[in-house]
Amino acid sequence: MADDEADEWRFSVDEVGPDDEDENEREAGWGNDGDATRDDDGPTVTVGGPERAAEELSEEGGNVAGTLAPGSAVEPGTPDFENVAFATAGAVLTAVVLAGIVVPLDPTTVGTITGVIVLGAGVLYALFRRF
């Protein structure tokens, strides 16, 4: 087992090569056509030039990481019974598991948890279906 350390794959920094390329070589192919901008991630090509890129970021945020705006319009609707049933079953299962960690489970405890959650889900389902 002492040979495990000797069997590991190792490499040297000399084998990897230099990290920095020549700045002139890297920049030579980008930015000459006017449609490419350079940021931290590298060159970004946009249709319409760099001015259009700034407009797109400000006007058409879209569904970009970090934004809360959805890609399409959100319309209110009524819940389907199947969705409510599965959400209620998940809530009951989660509550029973979490309660089992805190208190010993017996049929009364499980029945109370199930009854309260099912009653609450039924009231909310009726309320949302009615209005």
Image (cartoon, rainbow, N blue to C red):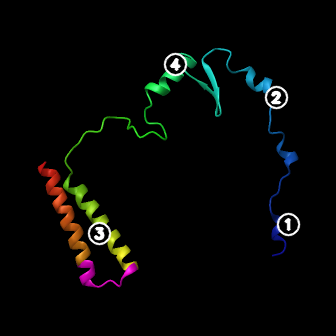
Image quadrant where residue 104 sits: bottom left
Q: In the rendered structure, which disc, 3 or 4, sits on the residue that comes first in sequence?
A: 4
Q: In the rendered structure, which disc, 1 or 2, sits on the residue that comes first in sequence?
A: 1
Residue 92's label in the rendered image is 3
The amino acid on which the numbered mark 1 sits, given as a three-letter code, is Ala
Tell me the element at label 2.
loop
| Pointer 3 with pointer 4, Cβ within 8 A | no
The amino acid on which the numbered mark 4 sits, given as a three-letter code, is Arg
Q: Nearer the viewer, mark 3 or mark 4?
A: 4
| Left or right for 26, reference 114 | right
Q: Nearer the viewer, mark 1 or mark 4?
A: 4
| Residue position for label 2 | 22
Tell me the element at label 3.
helix
Q: Residue at x 33, y 74 (%)?
A: 96
Q: Residue at x 54, y 17 (%)?
A: 51
The amino acid on which the numbered mark 3 sits, given as a three-letter code, is Val
- The alpha-carbon separation of the residues under discs 3 and 1 comes to 54 Å
Q: In the rendered structure, which disc, 3 or 1, sits on the residue that comes first in sequence?
A: 1
- The alpha-carbon separation of the residues under discs 1 and 2 comes to 37 Å
| Residue position for label 4 | 52
Residue 6's label in the rendered image is 1
Q: Which residues are magenta?
A: 102-111
The image shows residue 105, relative to residue 26, as above or below, that is below
Q: Residue at x 53, y 23 (%)?
A: 54
| Secondary structure mainly formed by the magenta segment | helix
